[in-house]
Each structure stands twice: as C-alpha cells, then as structure tokens.
Amino acid sequence: MKHRSIFLSLSLIFATSISTYFVTTSTRAQMGAAPAQTVADNEYQVGAILFQQRAAEYRALVYQSFNFARMMLDSDFEKKNLKLLPKSERRKPRAVIVDVDETVLDNSPHQAELIKLRLPFTNSLWTDWCNKRAAKAIPGAVDFLSYAAQKGARVFYVTNRNESEKQATIDNLKSVGFPDVSNETVVVRGTESSKELRRQKISEKYRIVLLAGDNLNDLAQVFERKSIDERFAEVEKARQEFGKRFIVLPNAMYGDWEAALYEYKRLGESEKTARRNSLLIIN
C-alpha cells in the first residue's frame, strides 16, 4: 500500500510537470515570445558606445571629416585641377560615395540596447532595428551631402545592408533629410560583402570624387580580409589619400578592425575576450 502511494505521488508530479511544460510552450507560442537568447559578454563595448553618444570629441571628429570632404569637393571644381584629369574623366559627372551605418546613420542606440539586454548581434535583431527607421543622422552628414548634391555631384549610398532592408533604409535616410535618396542611389549588398564591384559599376558612368566610410573596406578593396599588420601597411601606402579622396569616420563600436583582431574567425565569447586581452600593448 505504501509503495502504491509513492507511485501515485510520483505519477502526479510527472503529470503536473508535463502539463506545465505544454501550457508554457503553448502560451509562449500564442504570445510570440522569442526563445531564450545567448547571454553576450559585450560590456567591453560600453566605452565605445558612450564615446559616440556622449563625447564632444566624437562630434568634433565627424565635423572635421565632413569639413575636409567639402574642401576636397570644392577643390575638384577648380579648373586647374580639372585640367590634370584625362579628357574621358573630365566629361563624366561627379559622384560621392558614402557608406550608411556609422557614416551617415547613427546606430549606437541599437548597440546600446544589446548591451542593456546582454544580447549578441544577430541578423534578425539588426533587421528589426533597420525596420524601425529610427536611426538619426551622423552630425554634419546631411549638410555635406546636401552641399554635394547642390554642386551637382551624384550621391550614392553604398551599404552592406540586405535587399530586405533596402526600403526601410531609403525611408530612414529620407526622414532625416538626406538628398538624392532613391532605389538607384541606395546600393545594398548582393551575394558578397565586398563593395568593389558596386564601386566599379558606379565608376562606369561617374567619376568618383570622394569615398567616405567608417571602415577601410568602404574605401578600397586592398583593405579587405587583411591582418592587423597588413591593414597598417596598406594604410601607409595610401596615406596621401586620407583627407583627400578617402574620408574616414570614427567608429570604435564595431567593424573590420575588430574582425581582424579575431583573424576573421568565429570565436566564442571567452575566446574573443582572451584574444582582445592578448593584443593589448603595455610596453
């Protein structure tokens, strides 16, 4: 009798557990609740995000970048400089190519939300952010690109956002005042992340006067998939182009500079932390 009582009690506990599981699962499905997310070790990004959001120095740097861009664009209109170009290039209309994220649109609120919720970057969360159309303009970006458009330069927004994010990107750019925003001028990624083919396509009809981005890959193919030392070497080779044809915006939050730290490998959070610490220079 005693064994039977124990058996009935265990059966009741088991049945209750199964019932609770199915009720909970059903409720989550009805509410559209997301599955449990991986807890991310992204606290190290806080300083970078605060720098972009709260440092007057960051704002000064982006204004400085767009001031240089305006000076170089004006210089390109000077007759003495035009005469230095091949005739075939002189006849082409001018184009200015800019990246979108952290070059003309500020996504630091999305980065900050990931920190607050301790979530890793995922494509789905990024698409959700893009679809909100909530990014604000990087200071100075609207003024410069409006000036470029008024001068007669075509503005192209060459981004590694996906086709599924294109309309939201167009809407967001228009909503904060950017000029020359259309299905033609917003050029999203296709099957590859490299922007070289897209730049070449633009150069068939236009003379690219300036390229602006927060990532060296936004400027030229020579910087792509290079090690830390190789990236330094390529920058040295192109040093005369920075502040002239190449305009670099600051972004300490993310980018290929960080991917280079990890040697472009998919590492776990603890491996990334160890790798970052190992690369610190102390003497």
Image: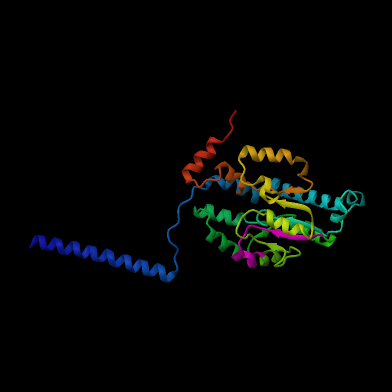
Quadrant where the N terminus is found in the figure: bottom left
Return the x and y of residue 107 as percentages of the image width and height: 62, 56
Give the image quarter of residue 239.
Answer: top right
Return the x and y of residue 183 as percentages of the image width and height: 70, 67
The answer to whether 10 appears left or right of 126 in the picture is left
Quadrant where the C terminus is found in the figure: top right
Residue 111 seen anywhere in this rendered image of the structure: yes
Give the image quarter of residue 5.
Answer: bottom left
- What's the image's color scheme? rainbow
The answer to whether 149 appears left or right of 197 in the picture is right
Return the x and y of residue 258 as percentages of the image width and height: 59, 45
Asked whether 103 or 95 is in front, the reply is 95
Q: Is residue 130 above or below residue 30?
A: above
Give the image quarter of residue 9.
Answer: bottom left
Residue at the spot 56% in from the left edge and 36% down from the top edge: 279
Asked whether 110 or 85 is in front, the reply is 85
Residue 215 seen anywhere in this rendered image of the structure: no
Q: Is residue 58 above or below residue 12?
A: above
Is residue 233 a member of the stretch shown in magenta? no
Residue at the spot 54% in from the left edge and 44% down from the top edge: 44
Asked whether 57 or 221 is in front, the reply is 221
Residue segment shown in magenta: 153-169
Q: Residue furthest bottom?
A: 30
Is residue 165 a member of the stretch shown in magenta? yes
Q: Residue furthest top?
A: 283
Return the x and y of residue 163 as percentages of the image width and height: 61, 64
